[in-house]
Image: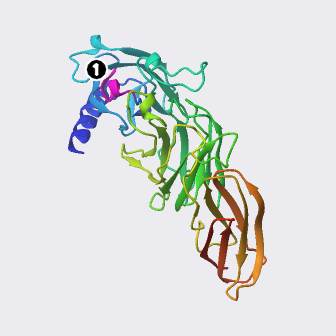
């Protein structure tokens, strides 16, 4: 942590000299999300040798900085002597007073890495995003955007259990508009864009302490590291305006070589949120195609709802239960197949 702070100070002091010289400036945050093991650490130069960020590590971010509007960014190997050693150079023209995020992403040699789409460009690049935010528009909310930065992952949806679809059809290199949500803890399911039943990974995103704040949530790493030079595994991270990067905890760790994410056992998950009012999400895993029933019972064992009855394919599935017509209290929900029965409790409050 001390090393990262000192690096940021060097960078800020270098750019501050530009602001002091009455050069028009914009606000910029830089995020290193290039998962190539050969780019695990890089040097970043702004306008050649005017400002330098030494040994900028993968999944690190700067705070928002004042930078000149006529901007050249060069990326060099770690511990480089000058910008003359750069391996990539990018030019940007920013609007004075504007706020931007620049995300370094991709791999240095695409031929050595997996891409699920022959037309997808996964080479090292910097993705600029305008209209960035350092705080939420509403002080009671949390504003965040999502950036898809995993080159071997398909276009994805992000579903917040008990809330709905946060991200729809986001492809590699794309970012969403800012989303505004309550400061709470969420379970986020990552699924292929065309199949929300095939959960590739689940993360817990704790935004409960970020009221009034903003963040960039970025998908990072490889779904199949073995096909990508054993690079870092897939994860979900949030970069905050002060430069802190927060990892989201993986709830489901089985990101499989195929994108179907097939489970190897039956499991009935705890509903989320719980307690709930009036709706909640119930998830369950099937290792095989099964005929099943999911039913809800009251405390006396009386059936009050049948959420599903029929065949489901193998995979992780989500069902929403709406208790608006029921009375407050404790309920039980049950998954039953030919070979498996599981029951859990949930609390409905008004």
Tell me the magenta residue range. Answer: 36-46
Q: Return the residue at label 1.
A: 77
Quarter location, residue 318: bottom right
Q: Is residue 16 left or right of residue 293?
A: left
Q: Residue placed farthest to the front in the image?
A: 339
Total label count?
Answer: 1
Left or right, residue 112 beside residue 129: left
Across and down, in percent, residue 46 comes to 34, 22
7 or 228: which is nearer to us? Answer: 228
Q: Nearer the viewer, residue 335 or 114?
A: 335
Residue 161 in view (yes/no):
no
Query: In the figure, 164 relative to 220: above or below?
Result: below
* Residue 338 appears in the picture as rendered: yes
Q: Which quadrant of the rendered structure holds the C terminus?
A: bottom right
Give the quadrant of the N terminus: top left
- Residue 108 lies left or right of residue 167; in this view the side is left
Q: Seen from this angle, which residue lies furthest top?
A: 84
Q: Is residue 93 left or right of residue 42?
A: right
- The residue most toward the bottom is 300
- Secondary structure, mark 1, is loop
Q: Is residue 61 above or below residue 84?
A: below
Residue appearing at x 24%, y 32% in the figure: 10
Which residue is depicted at the point 60% across and 19% down?
118
């Amino acid at each position: 942590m001390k090393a990262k702070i000192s690096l940021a100070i060097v960078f800020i002091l270098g750019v501050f000299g530009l602001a002091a010289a009455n050069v028009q400036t914009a606000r910029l945050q830089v995020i290193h999300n290039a998962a190539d093991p050969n780019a695990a650490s890089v040097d970043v130069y702004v306008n050649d040798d005017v400002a330098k960020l030494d040994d900028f590590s993968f999944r690190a971010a700067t705070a928002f900085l004042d930078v000149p509007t006529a901007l050249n960014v060069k990326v060099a190997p770690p511990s480089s002597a000058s910008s003359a050693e750069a391996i990539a150079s990018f030019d940007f023209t920013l609007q004075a007073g504007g706020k931007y995020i620049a995300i370094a992403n991709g791999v240095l040699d695409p031929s050595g890495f997996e891409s699920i789409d022959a037309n997808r460009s996964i080479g090292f690049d910097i993705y600029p995003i305008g209209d960035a935010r350092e705080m939420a528009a509403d002080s009671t909310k949390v504003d965040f955007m999502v950036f898809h930065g995993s080159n071997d992952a398909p276009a994805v949806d992000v579903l917040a259990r008990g809330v709905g679809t946060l991200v729809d059809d986001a492809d590699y290199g794309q970012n969403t508009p800012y989303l505004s949500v309550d400061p709470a803890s969420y379970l986020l399911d990552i699924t292929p864009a065309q199949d929300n039943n095939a959960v590739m990974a689940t993360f817990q995103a704790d935004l409960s302490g970020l009221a009034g704040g903003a963040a960039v949530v970025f998908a990072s790493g490889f779904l199949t590291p073995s096909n990508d030079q054993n690079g870092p595994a897939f994860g979900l991270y949030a970069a905050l305006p002060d430069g802190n990067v927060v990892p989201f905890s993986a709830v489901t760790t089985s990101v499989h070589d195929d994108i179907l994410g097939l489970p190897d056992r039956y499991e009935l998950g705890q509903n989320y949120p719980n307690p709930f009012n009036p709706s909640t999400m119930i998830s369950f895993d099937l290792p095989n195609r099964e005929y099943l029933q999911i039913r809800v019972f009251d405390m006396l064992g009386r059936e009050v709802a049948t959420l599903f009855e029929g065949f489901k394919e193998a995979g992780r599935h989500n069902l929403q239960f709406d208790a608006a017509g029921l009375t407050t209290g404790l309920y039980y929900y049950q998954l039953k197949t030919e070979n498996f029965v599981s029951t859990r409790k949930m609390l409905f409050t008004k």
